[in-house]
Image (spheres, coloured by chain):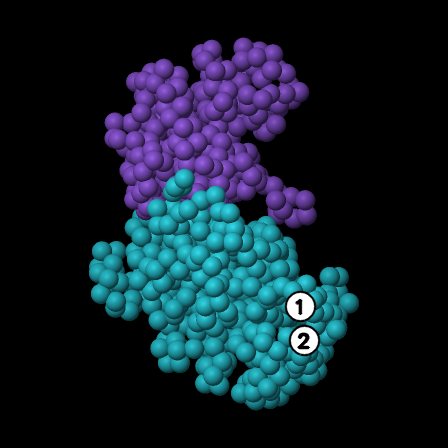
Chain colours: A purple, B cyan
Amino acid sequence: MIETETFLVERPDSMKATPMIGATPPMIGATPDLFTLGRSALLRVQQLHDGRGVFARSRQLLNTGAWKGPRDAADSFVEDEDLLALGGISAAQQVGVRTLVVTLDKLDLALPCEGLRLLCRFPYRHDDDAKRRDARIHSLATFMKSGLALDGLIPTPAGEPQGIDTLMLFARLRTDLQIPHVIADFTRLGHRLAQMALGFGADELHGPIQPERALRLGSNTWNPVMTRKEAAMLLRGAGLRPHERLSGGALEEVTS
Amino acid sequence: MTTFAAVREKVQAGEALSQNDGVVLFAHPNLMELGALANDVRQRLHGDRTYFNRNFHINATNVCVATCLFCSFSRLKEGDKGAYTMKLDEAWGRLQQRVDAGEPITEIHIVNGLHDGLPFDYYTDLLRGLKRIKPDIHLKAFTAVELFFFHKHYGMSVESILRQLQEAGLDSLPGGGAEIFHPRVRRKLCDDKCNADEWLDVHRTAHRLGLRSNCTMLYGHIETPEERVDHMLRLRALQTETGGFQTFIPLAFHPDNNAMMKLPGPTGVEDLRTYAVARLMLHNIPHLKAYWIMLGVKTAQTALWFGANDLDGTVQEERIYHMAGADTPQTLTPDEIVRLIVNAGRTPVERDTLYNVIAEGDALTSTKPFRRSIRKSLEVVP
């Protein structure tokens, strides 16, 4: 059952305007252990979101102009790699796109994205050089200082991610950067690791969420689609209170 | 009422935890606290050492008279679609080709269906043939469920069966078939194979004959936390009695292609929680194995910080869980396993089946140009 009384505004306007490096000293370059970093990340999620974990039924605008995902999706997004073929940001906005997902090296693209929710993919490999990864985090922090209203980061593995490395990265992004949302893309991480990331600083699930899911048979065995119920279960299992993002950005608590 | 803090005190004092303590641990909302406590115990027992071995699996037949609801591997009789029984030459050939290739395999893990049409000689000949090809290979073969089936089917005592298999080359027992001991669960899932007491008694007999064994628990289906704890306590009690268990292996239920495919299966957090609780409850079973075939490589690596100290082995061609939808690779090379362990900030130790050290630390890593040098920090140090 959905608790309809508790609509929450997703994040305060003050946070939209001034994203910046966190007040606590950044841990870039430091080497805390998994649990120390994880606890700090969890604490930050508690402070920012009061234990709320979010998912949304979303659909993606592809470079062909076609939509992928449910018609009645609450959110609609486009990846930067598809923007050019679609005619740019304003063209995408005109057909109903509400969220722009850019990769870190294309953040420039996002500067004229007034009115869109802006998410950034943070690329990583399990064998990344530490200095280069630090530099990437620093460059992101610098970008955010310049006033870019980045609403969320999606750590995105190149190749097969490793467990510990991924969780450490989620926790670092949460603790090093004062960013509203750190998002677990379950199509890239898998359901298990995505849920674990929710315990290490992530507060949102990203990926195809549909009303029903076919049984895991034949070619559907590896389909990453999850249902609304599964998303809520994963969030709840990770110790967060599941909320669904509705159209307009309001959050509704999922109580069943 | 027991609290997490009270349980933590007991753990720190080295006291055995009770049924109620275990339930409190499963209900504790803070996974990080639970993991840190399990990690403390792991560190106390093993430090950073994390074991693996070079093994492969033989599943000689999937014909099985049992009808366990969670099984995707078995076929009821010969001739059913997908049913197979290896000829002995074929099974021996699996080892021969690896010997010919110069692979330094130390263990074969053999688990089969309960085939009611094979003579007992099939199994003794299987072991003898493998030993003939490689006399020093360790044969970890036949679950307690299979051995109890042999006892019923061939009309011999469990002890007699074990002695004959030992004489043919059996070195230790795998831990499969335990599922969940509680009768409520067993009645629903697998009421036509041995019950908890019979499973435990087979292992008791094996331990008395000098065989070491492993033990398992299939979790994440219809069982309750209380039933998981009950399962662990029964294993712990036998371990107190015999000391014959080497490793506890929590096995994550896979819901695909079986009669329970509507169940969701355990989540990643549930996996880590179960590993952590197992490490805390089973203080007298030395090793906790993150079986990457079932957990997935990423979760298995993470479990190394939630109590686990063993990643199993190279495996090569696993059938039972892949038919149940495991999306893991069929094999990991030793280099890949070492890299996973090192990248988790642990020290790799190659072992044999009985946990004798074959190679450790630098001896395993120095030959490879690792791009990372990580110890406890888990972070990248250039």
Q: Residues within 10 Å of mark 2 (few under 14, many from 20)?
A: some
Q: Are marks 1 and 2 in contact (CB under 8 Å)?
A: yes
Check the residue under mark 1 and report the chain it is in: B
A188 lies above or below B184? above
- Which sits in the foreground, B353 or B282? B353
B42 lies above or below B339? below
Percent coordinates x, y for residue B74 in the rendering: 65, 65
Q: Is residue A245 left or right of residue B62?
A: left
Q: Residue at x 58, y 29 (%)?
A: A70
Q: Residue at x 39, y 19 (%)?
A: A143
Label 1 sits on residue: B99
Question: Gap between marks 1 and 2, in whole Å?
Answer: 8 Å
- Which sits in the foreground, B320 or A167? A167
Q: Residues within 10 Å of mark 1 (few under 14, many from 20)?
A: some
Check the residue under mark 2 and report the chain it is in: B
Q: Is residue B207 in view from this perspective?
A: yes
- Which sits in the foreground, A72 or B214? B214
Dot 1 amino acid type: Val
Dot 2 amino acid type: Ile
- Which sits in the foreground, A62 or B334? B334
Percent coordinates x, y for residue B363 in the rendering: 47, 59
The dot on residue B133 is 2
